Image: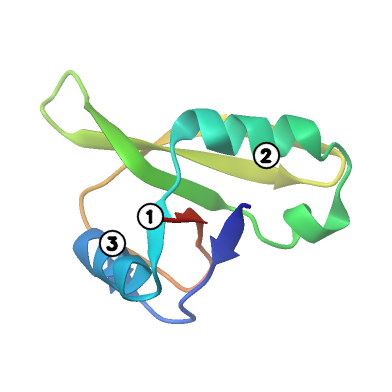
Amino acid sequence: EAHLVNFDTYVFTDGVRTLLAEMGLRPGLPTELADLSTSTPGSKELAGCLPAVALGDQMQGGLGNLLVVFLAGDATGRALSLHWQGGGWNDSYWFLAFRK
């Protein structure tokens, strides 16, 4: 079962991973984030938890920066995009997670 977790504070990526682990959760994968979006079209509940980030995988950009997939939008439309993982995340971000 997918969980969308918000920490209601500014937190760095390593801190998100640590906090999720302490909750018995693992970060979601980009494919899981895409599946969540396509399996709940028009969901106002999901729209209230955007932007949502999948920290379970990352890729290296052309400039050597690390990128993660995130989902943005609302109940009328959503899009997956890449986010530079250089700093932290403010309280508007939600993190996809699953029980370990």
Q: In which quarter of the image is the C terminus?
A: bottom left
Q: Which mark is residue 26?
A: 1
Helix, strand or loop at label 2? It is helix
Helix, strand or loop at label 1? It is strand
Task: Place residue 4 in its image quadrant.
Answer: bottom right
Tell which tag, 1 or 2, sits nearer the viewer.
1
Residue at (66%, 60%) from the top-left corner? 49
Mark-to-mark CA distance, 3 and 2? 20 Å
Residue 41, relative to residue 44: is it above or below?
A: above
Residue identified by numbered label 2? 36
Q: Do the residues labelled 1 and 2 touch (CB within 8 Å)?
A: no
> Which percent across, then down, holds residue 54?
44, 44
Task: Place residue 10 in its image quadrant.
Answer: bottom left
Mark-to-mark CA distance, 3 and 1? 7 Å
Residue at (78%, 34%) from the top-left corner? 39
Left or right: 28 with respect to 38? left
Helix, strand or loop at label 3? It is helix
Callout 2, which amino acid? Leu
Callout 3, which amino acid? Arg
Circle nearer the N terminus (1, 2): 1
